[in-house]
Image (cartoon, rainbow, N blue to C red):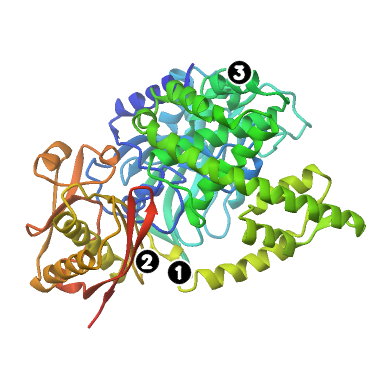
Amino acid sequence: MKAIEIRNKYLNFFKNHGHNVIPSAPLIPENDPSVLFTTAGMQPLVPYLLGEKHPEGTRLTDYQKCVRTNDIEEVGDNRHLTYFEMLGNWSLGDYFKEESIQMSYDFLTKELQIPAEKLSVTCFAGDEDCPKDEVSASCWKKAGIPEERIYFYGKDDNWWIAGEEGPCGPDTEMFYDTGKPACSPDCQPSCDCGKYVEIWNNVFMEYFKDKNGYTKLEQKNVDTGLGLERMTMLLQGKETPYDTELFEPIMKKLEELQKIDSIQSRRIVAEHLRSSMMIIADGGRPSNIDRGYVLRRLIRRMIRHLNKLQISLDEISTLIAINVENLKGMYPELEKNQATIQEVLLEEKNKFVKTLAHGEREFNKEMQKAKQAGTNVINGQVVFRLYDTYGFPPEVTKELAEENGFQIDLEEFEKLFKQHQEKSRAGSEHKFKGGLADQTEETIAYHTATHLLNAALKQIIGKDAHQRGSNITAERMRFDFNCDHKLTEEEKKAVEDLVNEWIQEGIPVTKQEMSKEEAIKSGAECMFIEKYPDIVTVYSIGDVSKELCGGPHVSNTNELGRFKIKKEESSSSGIRRIKAVLIKE
């Protein structure tokens, strides 16, 4: 069964069980600086899990594009991926454990036709905060899982919470028996020998944790996640995701082109290329900080392994075209943005070729010095100098060192890098405290101000100026928009004056729910139209602004304070960036 078939079966199954299908949110979270990328299906739904009403109701399902960055260096083995797709279904105060478990069992055994004897499940064992989850175990028995394949584990395995505080609860996880021999008589789902593979996780959010402990939520939710690549691999009887149709064409081409054989390098190139293309298609661009640095790191690691395979970097365009052709049925945004993807990747390639040549020469000098000194450790000052002077990524230095039997003093590098960050990014240390979990008066005001800024740019610069991204903290706003020139001082002042004029007018901010088609017909603007459900929320600021947006916003513009542009600069090719503050007077 192919990946697209599994996805469609999943969405149709839950649609037939009363769920509304909602579109995938972009990989780059809008107005959420608390995370670099969308990492799970639940992330865009946090406000609704906390009680806000979702326009599509209490039963939802979708596929969600996800990027997780903590395993980049593990990519190249037989299972780790940076980009992956998560299938999910949610109950927002609707059904709970029994119906959730029965639907999961039915989907696995009837739709995917997995033999019931291949399934084992785990439940929460209980502790002083929450009792043993006998309810889930009973539901599994009723569905068809025998008691000997139901296991109980503690919080490390069967409890979910995002961060230190927030909505949380016990979960139940489903495991697929691959048929591999047990590593011992005690082998069970908690073992990582490879016999059991986790395929699905149902979280039962019935608690809220804060500094004082756990309390019961008024609204009980179900939050589930099923990894598409992993399920595809298992159902096709493949050893790795790279053996499935998602990667097969690109892996085959790399094998044809390579002059040095390395399955690890081929996997790294294939995975990082797909991840980079998906991020770029959703608006990501390489830079030296935050998500831009993650993208730069993915591209540069891919290029280094193309070099290791001795594949000409001129083949990057061919590899992009192969991926677009192979994946456009699942991700039409790749074909739509193919020219941009190619432009960004080739520009980054050209930059890195120079960096790589300089950095490797310097690294080889330092390696010879270390050999003469009788040590196999490259000190952290060298690693930092390569990064700071030559732009040579520390992870590349680490890989080069390991390939030559050396180690790097990572602890010393991180200490120096932290000092560098504190100097170069002073004042932005609170960047990741915002987002959905931090809807303060300040962030809400800045969110509303982005709408006014967007409207002002259309009047002053031109109607074709559109928002291309934003980042908000409690101290400032950052707003990206398309524009082919640096703003003049006159243009900046005119934009600033117009925003302040609207603020002083005290214009009410109103909220309406309507169909997406009605919203577009009414002239409402939005970024990433494809991410919105059929029923949308439209915020209007008098006759000044009308946008599709998830909110929240102030009720009147006179709550904002004075708007001041602090800086206007280039963000990337054809994209300008304004940094501004609101001054309370």
Q: Which residue is mark 3?
A: 237
Category of crowding for the residue at label 3, using alpha-carbon neighbours closer than 10 angstroms: few (below 14), some (14–19), many (at least 20): few
Asked whether the viewer can see residue 14, the reply is yes
Q: Which residue is mark 1?
A: 430
Image quadrant containing the C terminus = bottom left
The residue closer to the viewer here, 395 or 221, is 395
In percent of width and height, residue 115 lies at 55, 18
Q: Amino acid at mark 2?
A: Thr
The residue closer to the viewer here, 21 or 581, is 581
Q: Amino acid at mark 1?
A: His
In percent of width and height, residue 467 lies at 27, 51
Query: Which label belongs to residue 295?
Result: none
Asked whether the viewer can see residue 201, the reply is no
Q: Quadrant of residue 224?
A: top left
Farthest bottom residue in view: 585
Q: Residue at x 19, y 40 (%)?
A: 535
Q: Secondary structure at mark 2?
A: loop
Callout 3 touching callout 2 (CB < 8 Å): no
